[in-house]
Image (cartoon, rainbow, N blue to C red):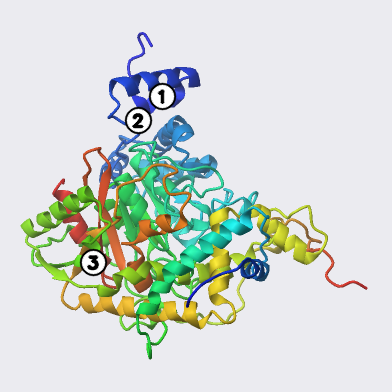
Amino acid sequence: MGGRRGSNDVATRPHEGPEKGRKKERIRLSIEAKTPETYVEKPRTLAGLRADLAAGRTKAADLAASYYERIAQVNPRLNVYLSLTKERAMEQAERMDALAAKGDPLPALAGVPVGIKDVLVMRGAPATAGSKILAGYWPPYDATAVERLEAAGAVLLGKLNCDEFAMGSSTENSAYGPVRNPVDTERVPGGSSGGSAAAVAANMAVATLGSDTGGSIRQPASFCGVVGVLPTYGRVSRYGLIAYASSLDRVGPFASNVRDAATMLSVIAGHDPKDATSSAAHVPDFAAESDKPVAGLRIGVPREYFAEGLDAEVRAAIEAGIGALEAAGCTVKPVSLPNTKYAVPTYYLIATAEASANLARFDGVRYGPRSKNAETLSDMYRHSRDEGFGAEVKRRILLGTYALSAGYYDAYYLKAQQVRRLLAEEYLRAFDSVDAIVTPTAPTPAFKLGEKTGDPLAMYLADIYTVTASLAGICGVTVPCGATQAGLPVGMQVLARHLKEGTAFRVARAVEAAHI
Amino acid sequence: MTAKVTVEDVERVAELAHLELTPEETPRMLHDLNAILDYVAELNELDTKGVTPLAQVSELGDAAGAGALRADLLLPSLDRAVVLAQAPETDRVFFKVPKVIER
């Protein structure tokens, strides 16, 4: 390696030949077996980017080019991006540079390089939803959230890997291979928005969009050490989001810090006539909301989220975070959510039932490949679906179809909807006495690739702390809150009532400021 | 809610869902479905008599997402040619599928 300074930097290793890389890996392991291969690199902040762009110190086109370089460098190892949209990105970057050169006012996200989870459609890029069943599909329109990002000046770099149809908690269910966690590449980034979380952690985008049905933004954000937002149901339009479970699906942002995530949400939120569940509520300036002090806020800590199954190191980190909130002047009080243990079974019945209906549209007629081995219409549907869907998607369609089928509807689907109401009301009652509720985002730090793939139930339990907020439609933010001895990030989930994202951002800012 | 799914149940549900399972997939799905249904049977512990099912969070008092329906107006939609270009087989007006009715 003589003379090549920086060649020890693991981040540059994918540039070397595979032989060299492997050899060095072995040496590294024997010398410092405790240090995992890491690709963590903080992206720029929105404020810094904006100042540089306005002052002419940075050009949006150069910035976009540098992000594409970074992606070319590390994507072979991390498998974060599924496709790149260079042409569209460079055109937008040049538009922003022209605005800056004229001295015109810059929109909120001028020149900000962003990535989009590949369950949101976007012109100029294939949409896969991580599935083979959509191979070759190029959607002719933009999702509303994507359109709003671009209208605010963001530069759309490309589409991000995820679990097939957002079904999974580790991104190992992608038909295009798993994403690796930039913190430790032997570990999963979480899921289903694993690509969106990893992209921010590894500085392959300044911010990204993901989707969250049962925890798919919050859990990967926690595993990768970044900020992830679950907006209130209805806050962000679902138009252009490939549907998994429509009564639960949300679109939300990832960023490296709370304030930037808040800015992203203000851009994508707001009423959209193309989504019948879209809320007409006023959208505040969430970044400004997040600047407000937290002193005097009442913070609830539900004991059920600190019970058996919580990793000791995660518990210690979250307790330190709660201590920081107390030190910042919050009142911390215990709250009780006794039905918590019923949330995961309720979620898996409702989500799979809705999925079985939503995924009926993938049948080889309108988009995606059609099986060549079928003569009748019925065979064509079945063969196309068999060849296109992965095992977890089939499992969930079967479970959902079973729960909805004659004779079982009342016992499973209806029962789950009743419990859903109990769970939602329990949360709303708790919010009568507190402004926010804080919990661990996940019971453990990031687990190893392959660790849970053989046991669907074990994988479902990775969502144990996130599914209830999904069922209740409330909002939340997950914010980095310390790390384990091995350096794996821990995330704190801050939940607030419907439409009170501003409160969740404030509390998350206080946790972030404590540098736990 | 005492679940004991049989191979026949799995095959019937697969047919309802237009899914085809290989001989290797069926026993695996049978095992997984039974494990998951055993687990969700925990819900039986809860008395939900008289509880109104919650299908959408907009039914909750203070929730968002209760947007009104838009006016039923004729507005331009995606161009037919652009949409049909994505389909495996068309006659440029309709999607084509294998023959359904034998004459």
Q: Is residue B68 above or below residue A353?
A: below
* Whole-percent x, y for residue B69 in the image: 49, 81
Q: Residues within 10 Å of mark 1 (few under 14, many from 20)?
A: many
Observer-nearest of A6 and B42 = B42
Q: Relative to A127, is A48 on the left or the right?
A: left
Determine the secondary structure under disc 2. Answer: loop
The kind of residue on which mark 1 rests is: Arg
The kind of residue on which mark 3 rests is: Glu
- Do the residues bearing badges 1 and 3 touch, measured as CB atoms within 8 Å? no
Q: How many marks?
A: 3
Q: Relative to A342, is A298 on the left or the right?
A: left
- Disc 1: host chain: A
Q: Circle 2 is placed at which residue position?
A: A37
Q: Residues within 10 Å of mark 2 (few under 14, many from 20)?
A: some
Observer-nearest of A245 and A88 = A245
Q: Which residue sits at x=43%, y=70%?
A: B40
Q: Circle 3 is placed at which residue position?
A: A304
Q: Relative to B36, is A54 on the left or the right?
A: left
- Do the residues bearing badges 2 and 1 touch, measured as CB atoms within 8 Å? yes
